[in-house]
Amino acid sequence: MLIVGLTGGIATGKSSVATVFEKLGAKIIDADSICRDLVHPGSAAWQEIVEAFGESVLTSNRNINRKKLGEIIFRDSEKKELLNSILHPKIINEEKRRVNLIRKEEPHAIVAINAALLVESGNYKEVDLVVVVTSSEESMINRMVKRDKISKEEALLRIKAQMPAGEKIKYADYVIENNGTMTELRKKAVNLFEELKNAETLKPEYSI
């Protein structure tokens, strides 16, 4: 089994790369999806978040208001760390559980863990190699404005709250630059996946 950590900043295109990998046969474990499952009303993570941030971060049906919580943590690094301390251990434990299930069923599978905070959480230490997807600040802002219906100022605030791309790349075995078209990104993802199927040929710090 080959465990790949797939990461990158917000709106860089890492989920699009994950989609390509999945179509080519990889097993995808999505950290954001796990997070959504973990914070359902009444769960342990939900209770800790409510205790830490108050009921103002809840919607009318008692779900976590992700947009409101995001606005809080992108403006306050201490609160961001607090939220991460609640969620990261639980997300990583669930990722490990899912990896072990896949290992039992398909011991030679390629597993890609799609996680924006793979490096920040320390979970990069648990994977065989790290793929970082990067994009220009302008491209990231444009995608967020279109996708999330937020202002350019809010998009920039979210980017600045993240680990800089240059820092994240230091942990990468592979880097995919996404500043072109979706077709170009898919081609790069396909080329990389072909490399991953022959793990013995992997080269450190390889960029495409």
Image (tube, rainbow, N blue to C red):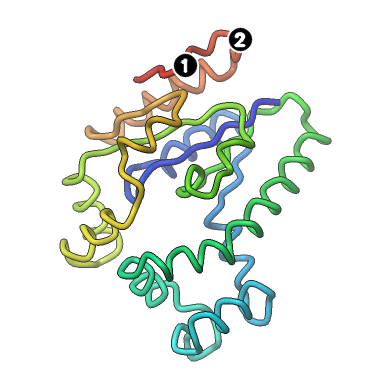
Q: Position of residue 51 (x, y in %)?
A: 57, 84
The residue singled out by tag 1 in the image is 204
Secondary structure, mark 1, is loop
Q: Residue flagged by tag 2: what amino acid is it?
A: Glu
Q: Residue at x 48, y 48 (%)?
A: 120
Does 83 sit above or below residue 99? below
Going by the image, does 38 lie left or right of 141? Answer: right
Q: Say how many tags the image has.
A: 2
Does 196 sit above or below residue 20? above
Q: Residue flagged by tag 1: what amino acid is it?
A: Pro
The residue singled out by tag 2 in the image is 200
Secondary structure, mark 2, is helix
Q: Residue at x 45, y 31 (%)?
A: 171
Q: Position of residue 87 (x, y in %)?
A: 58, 63
Location of residue 155 by image quarter: bottom left
Q: Residue at x 27, y 54 (%)?
A: 159
Q: Nearer the viewer, mark 1 or mark 2?
A: 1
Going by the image, does 179 lie left or right of 199? Answer: left
